[in-house]
Image (cartoon, grey):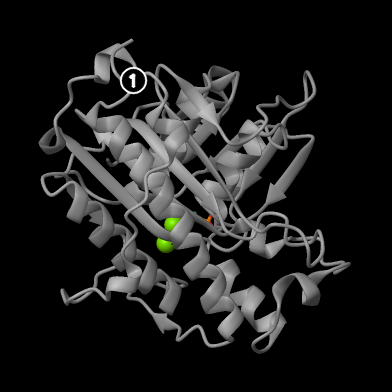
Amino acid sequence: MASGMATVMRLLASSYSVAEKAGTIVRRVLHSGDLEIVQKTGVNDLQTLADRLVQKSICASLSRRFPKITIIGEEDLPSETVEEDLIETGQYDVILQKPCPEEYSTLKEEELVVWVDPLDGTKEYTEAAKLLDGPVIVQKRFQNHTAPIRLLDHVTVLIGIAYRGKAIAGVINQPFYNYQMGEDAALGRTLWGILGLGAFGFQLQDVPEGKRIVTTTRSHSNKLVIDAVQAMEPHDVIRVGGAGNKIIQLVEGKASAYVFASPGCKKWDTCAPEAILHAVGGKLTDMHGRAYCYDADVKHMNSAGVLATLRNHQYYASRVPQTVLQALSSD
Ligand code: AMP
Ligand code: MG
Ligand code: MG
């Protein structure tokens, strides 16, 4: 292990602090009661004020400290000066004190690509806002709320770091974690990880032995998705929003496989989650079992879907129907 001051560790420490600030912005916009929603070009593809502000905050903060890295964010925004109050300069100490895995200790800024999803689970964020119906304290409104789908848990902020096409490190902030625990509960948490060191900020847990619990989309389903989920012969299916949220379900033992047999997810959805999942021994691939590449010049769309597991990836990959594989053959 080399020195903890390696560039990638400093970038990860900054990304952690930047993701925490992002979480405060996501909460603030929801509390304000006005999401300023814009419909993007695709069907069922929304953008809110939080998506825009957070992307500006993350990109400007990271590029100011690391001017030579390539940063690719989900939102297409006009280039304009970023307000100073969106800039985060902190670096999470705990990460700075960790040893950098030897193979990444000499990486240079210009070799790193950062994939940013400023708000993953926007659909669920907007639905939660509708339920809240105006500017209120989230914990107060949702305390003892009986809705079975905890919509605000689906929302995450994703910052993934890639080197030579591989997702090597990542940060996931979950801004509303604990939101049903009452007004005094501290809201939000940040998970992070890097290959060769591990992942932190949560308790790693497996599903009970032999249980097949599939997590999949709740708002972007279609026949291919349904066919692939059924082919896994799951004991249970959990339909929730967000790629980040679904990976959290895998590492916390709530689901054994994330199955999304459709185009729709992009590189910024999977880079950070993949790095964290791989850091604890899991696997994220397309539905064919092939790895995605995160180089700066790749196509953004994960056209052949997403299959992710903490264990037994081969089992799930082997059960994907041929018809589904044929429909998802392009890359
Ligand atoms: P979901 O599981 O539906 O929440 O999707 C995970 C991520 O992929 C989210 O960022 C979605 O916006 C994105 N996504 C998946 N399918 C589509 C789609 N058909 N159109 C736009 N975005 C999608
Ligand atoms: Mg997303
Ligand atoms: Mg997004």
Quarter of the picture containing the C terminus is top left
Residue at image coords 64%, 60%: 176
Asked if 299 appears above or below 59 in the picture, the reply is above
Give left or right: position of 14 versus 312: left
Q: Amino acid at mark 1?
A: Cys
Give left or right: position of 295 versus 98: left
Circle 1 packing at 10 Å, graded few (<14), some (14-19), many (20+), is many
Picture quadrant of residue 240: bottom right
From the viewer's side, name the closer residue of 265 and 249.
249
- Residue 133 location (% of width, % of height): 68, 88
- Residue 320 location (% of width, % of height): 54, 31
Asked whether residue 302 appears in the rendered view, the answer is no
Helix, strand or loop at label 1? It is: loop
Give left or right: position of 253 versus 63: right
Asked if 59 appears above or below 275 in the picture, the reply is below
Residue at which label 1 appears: 100
Asked whether residue 85 appears in the rendered view, the answer is yes
Asked if 162 appears above or below 279 in the picture, the reply is below
From the viewer's side, name the closer residue of 25 and 123.
25
Image quadrant of ligand 3 equals: bottom left
